[in-house]
Amino acid sequence: MAIFLGVIVGIIIFLFAQYNGLVKRKKKVEQAKSGIDVYLTQRFNLIPNLVECVKGYAKHEQQIFDKVVQMRTRYMNNKNLKEGAELNSECNHIIALAENYPELKASEQFLDLQKSLSKMESQLQAARRIYNSEVTAYNTKISVVPTNIIASMFNFKEEELFQLETEEARKNIEVKM
């Protein structure tokens, strides 16, 4: 009887340990996702300044500016990482637009904004790598035996890796080159 009771207690301890491990991994994924969100928000807070700076030089590009402002508002309301990736692509388009305006490239304000955006992009890339690393560790943990049994019992689902570029963005980059 003592052996049977010892086995049951051992199984319960094992289940708790595995469950707690899954919860910790899930929390790390959420924390990493929050890190991306922080950098995206900081970067997108620079957008109104960038738009105002470029507007004076490129008045006929109004539809691009309107689209970026709408996308920024939508992202700030939803905090959806996919919308953030699309907005990131549009921000890069505005910076590329500056190539057509030599006097804009010489603007000190534009250069400062461009440096700030470059710095933010570097931090964002680091946050994306951390997030993807945490998601990979979490997805691996819920996929391997015996943790996969506990993960399915408690409805742990795989997380998606953060992918910056949509298929459309890749096509746009290829066309520009």
Image: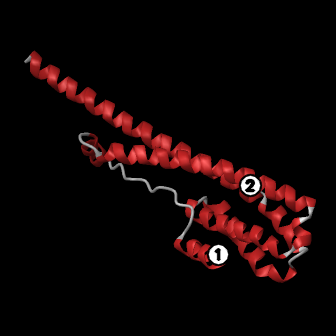
- Disc 2, disc 1: CB below 8 Å? no
Mark 2 packing: few (<14 Cα in 10 Å), some, or many (20+)?
A: few
**Amino acid type at mark 1:** Met
Q: Which residue is mark 1?
A: 177
Tell me the SS state at disc 2.
helix
Work out which quarter of the rendered image holds the N terminus and state it. top left
Would you place residue 120 above or below residue 21 in this image?
Answer: below
Q: Residue furthest front?
A: 177
Q: Is residue 23 above or below residue 1?
A: below
Residue 101 lies, in percent from the top left, at: 86, 74
Q: Which residue does the image show at 38% across and 53% down from the upper left?
A: 158
User: Is residue 153 toward the left or the right of residue 159 in the image?
Assistant: left
| Label number found at residue 112 | none
Label 2, label 1: how far apart the Cα atoms are:
21 Å
Look at the picture and state if 61 lies above or below 132. Answer: below
Residue labelled with disc 2: 118
Between circles 2 and 1, the one closer to the viewer is 1
In the rendered image, residue 139, in percent from the top left (x then y), is placed at 38, 48
Q: Position of residue 29 (x, y in %)?
A: 49, 45
Q: In the image, what residue type sits under mark 2?
A: Ser
Taking the image as shown, residue 111 lies to the left or right of residue 160, namely right
Residue in view at x 86 percent, y 55 percent: 112
